[in-house]
Image (spheres, helix red, strand yellow):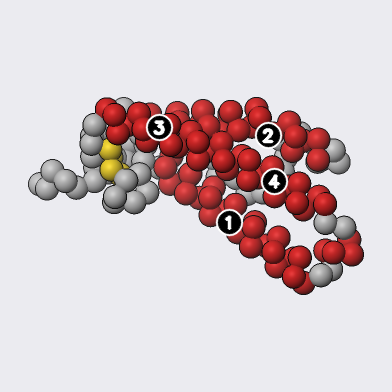
C-alpha cells in the first residue's frame, strides 16, 4: 500500500494521518498540519457565514425595480451559486468523517453565526430567526 495515499474513512475517526481535505494536495501528515488545517477550516467556515450575511444584505437592498433588471438578477444568482458551492465544499470536509475537521467546521460556523448571524436576522425581520434564503449544507 502506498504510504502517500489519502486515507478514506467510512466511519467516524479521530485519526488524522494521511487525511486529505477535499484536494489531494491538502493532506494532513503531522500534528502541526492538523492544527493548521483546523485553523484554516475555522476561518473558511467563518468566511462562509460572512458571505451569507453579505449576500443577504445585498439581496435585501435590491428594490423591486432593480430585481426586474436582468443584470442584477444574474449577479445575484452568480453570488448565490458561489454560496452554494462554498457550502458544498464545507459539507465535503464533514464527509471526511474526521472528528477534528468536523469540530473545526462547527466551531467556525458557530463563531461566524455569532458575529454575523444576528445581523442577518435583523435584515430578515419578516422571516423567523434561523431561516434564511440559502441552502446551507453545514
- Separation (CA) of disc 2 from disc 3: 21 Å
Q: Quadrant of residue 53?
A: top right
> Are discs 2 and 3 less than 8 Å apart at CB?
no
**Residue matched to label 1:** 82
Say whether marks 1 and 3 touch (CB < 8 Å): no
The residue indicated by pointer 4 is: 54
Disc 2 on helix, strand or loop? Answer: helix
Label 2 and label 1: CA atoms lie apart by: 18 Å
- Residue under numbered circle 2: 116
Q: Position of residue 92 (x, y in %)?
A: 43, 46
Which of the two residues, 15 or 9, is positioned nearer the viewer here? 15
Direction from residue 86 to residue 127 in the image, left or right: right
Dot 1 crowding, Cα within 10 Å, few <14, some 14–19, many 20+: few
Q: Earlier in the sequence, mark 3 or mark 4?
A: 3
How far is disc 3 from disc 4 in space, using C-alphas? Answer: 24 Å
Query: Of label 2 and label 1, which has the lower sequence position?
Result: 1
**Between discs 1 and 3, the one toward the N terminus:** 3
> Residue tagged by mark 3?
38
- Residue 17 percent across, percent down from the top left: 23, 34
What is the x, y in percent for residue 76?
A: 71, 60
Residue farthest along the bottom direction in this orientation: 70
Secondary structure of residue under mark 3: helix
**Earlier residue among tags 4 and 1:** 4
Q: Position of residue 133 (x, y in %)?
A: 72, 48
| Above or below, comparing residue 135 to residue 11 in the picture | below
Amino acid at each position: 500500500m502506498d504510504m502517500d495515499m489519502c486515507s478514506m474513512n467510512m466511519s467516524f475517526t479521530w485519526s488524522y494521518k494521511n487525511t486529505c481535505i477535499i484536494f489531494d494536495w491538502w493532506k494532513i501528515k503531522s500534528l502541526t498540519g492538523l492544527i493548521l488545517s483546523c485553523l484554516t477550516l475555522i476561518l473558511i467556515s467563518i468566511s462562509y457565514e460572512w458571505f451569507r450575511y453579505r449576500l443577504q444584505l445585498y439581496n435585501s437592498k435590491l428594490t423591486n425595480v432593480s430585481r426586474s433588471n436582468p443584470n442584477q438578477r444574474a449577479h445575484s444568482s452568480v453570488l448565490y451559486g458561489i454560496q452554494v458551492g462554498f457550502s458544498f465544499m464545507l459539507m465535503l470536509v464533514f464527509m471526511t468523517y474526521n472528528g477534528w475537521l468536523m469540530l473545526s467546521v462547527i466551531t467556525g460556523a458557530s463563531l461566524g453565526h455569532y458575529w454575523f448571524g444576528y445581523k442577518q436576522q435583523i435584515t430578515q425581520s419578516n422571516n423567523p430567526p434561523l431561516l434564511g434564503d440559502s441552502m446551507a449544507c453545514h
